[in-house]
């Protein structure tokens, strides 16, 4: 569970709800026609923009903003160094047994390719291709939420214009103008909340998740290529440490 996402969304909605309740009842911010215009219009526009399957897939990708366990890069480097030492002492085939201790599917695949006798450059090329397609899939999910964020305020404005037109039709009753204007503005409110409190932050989080995942997979490729090349473990560790900030680096040779 990503506490930052949960706390962020909870704080945003909680503080808005508190402000609403301090000014009046929550019911004045609930209007079914406005909800239908904004939510229905935003979803409809997004379905026009993207295939139905991609939109459904984005809903699944959204889980990564809440349910994501970040792999420790230092722990990964330590693990790769252990595999490097094992391969130097016992041969590359010794990694076959070590695969049972690996949870990450990408690392396990890289190890299997190494055990199967792939050349270092071939391994890099094949795994880089997989990373490219992962970036495409992740990017599409983030783009869909960015589209949600773009369409929601637009549909909010459309709803407001609809409400204003309906309000102007009843100008002969001054008492109805205030409530009608309030209802008209609710669609703008809904659109702004969807865009700026939910969809834009989620799109940003997905992009950050993708960048972090690509970094880890790239580090795995570098490590496995070094192992296949029989590189000196100290040189290998220095190469892998280049992926993280200096203050976070932990050398396995100093332990």
Image (tube, helix red, strand yellow):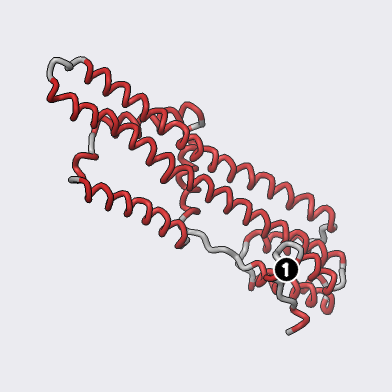
Percent from the top left, x then y, of residue 250? 71, 75
Percent from the top left, x then y, of residue 188? 34, 32
Does 160 sit left or right of 1 as displayed? Answer: left
Closest to the observer, 73 or 173: 173
Q: Quadrant of residue 235?
A: bottom right
Does 250 sit left or right of 3 as displayed? Answer: right
Residue 127 visible to an observer of this rendering: yes
Q: Quadrant of residue 93?
A: bottom right
Q: Which residue is mark 1?
A: 246
Residue at the outermost bottom position: 255
Q: Residue at x 59, y 42 (%)?
A: 139
Total numbered circles:
1
Q: Residue at x 82, y 78 (%)?
A: 90
Above-or-below relation of 200 to 156: below
Residue 54 visible to an observer of this rendering: no
Does 91 sit left or right of 48 as displayed? Answer: right
Closest to the observer, 96 or 179: 179
> Where is the C terminus found, in terms of image quarters?
bottom right
Percent from the top left, x then y, of residue 31? 23, 35
Closest to the observer, 249 or 130: 249
Percent from the top left, x then y, of residue 54? 51, 37
Crowding at mark 1 (Cα within 10 Å: few <14, some 14-19, many 20+): few
Above-or-below relation of 232 to 254: above
Q: Residue at x 47, y 33 (%)?
A: 150
Above-or-below relation of 135 to 50: below
Q: Residue at x 79, y 70 (%)?
A: 237
Secondary-structure class at tag 1: helix
Above-or-below relation of 9 to 142: below
Closest to the observer, 159 or 214: 159
Q: Quadrant of residue 253?
A: bottom right
């Amino acid at each position: 569970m990503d506490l930052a996402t949960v706390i962020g969304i909870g704080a945003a909605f909680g503080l808005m709800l508190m402000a609403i309740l301090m000014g009046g009842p929550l019911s004045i911010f609930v209007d079914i026609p406005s909800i239908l215009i904004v939510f229905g219009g935003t979803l409809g526009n997004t379905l026009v923009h993207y295939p139905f399957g991609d939109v459904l897939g984005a809903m699944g990708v959204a889980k990564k903003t809440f349910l994501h366990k970040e792999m420790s890069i230092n722990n990964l480097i330590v693990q790769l160094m252990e595999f490097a030492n094992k391969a130097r002492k016992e041969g590359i085939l010794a990694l076959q047994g070590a695969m049972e201790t690996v949870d990450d599917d990408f690392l396990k695949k890289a190890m299997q390719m190494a055990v199967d006798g792939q050349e270092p450059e071939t391994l890099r090329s094949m795994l880089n291709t997989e990373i490219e397609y992962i970036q495409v899939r992740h990017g599409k999910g983030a783009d869909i939420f960015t589209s949600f964020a773009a369409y929601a305020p637009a549909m909010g404005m459309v709803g407001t214009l609809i409400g204003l037109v309906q309000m102007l039709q009843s100008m002969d009753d001054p008492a109805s103008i205030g409530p009608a204007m309030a209802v008209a503005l609710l669609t703008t409110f809904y659109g702004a909340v969807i865009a700026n409190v939910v969809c834009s932050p989620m799109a940003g989080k997905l992009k950050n998740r993708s960048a972090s995942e690509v970094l880890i997979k790239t580090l795995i490729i570098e490590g496995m290529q070094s192992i296949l090349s029989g590189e000196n473990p100290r040189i290998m560790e220095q190469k892998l440490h280049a992926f993280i900030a200096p203050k976070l680096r932990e050398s396995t040779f100093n332990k």
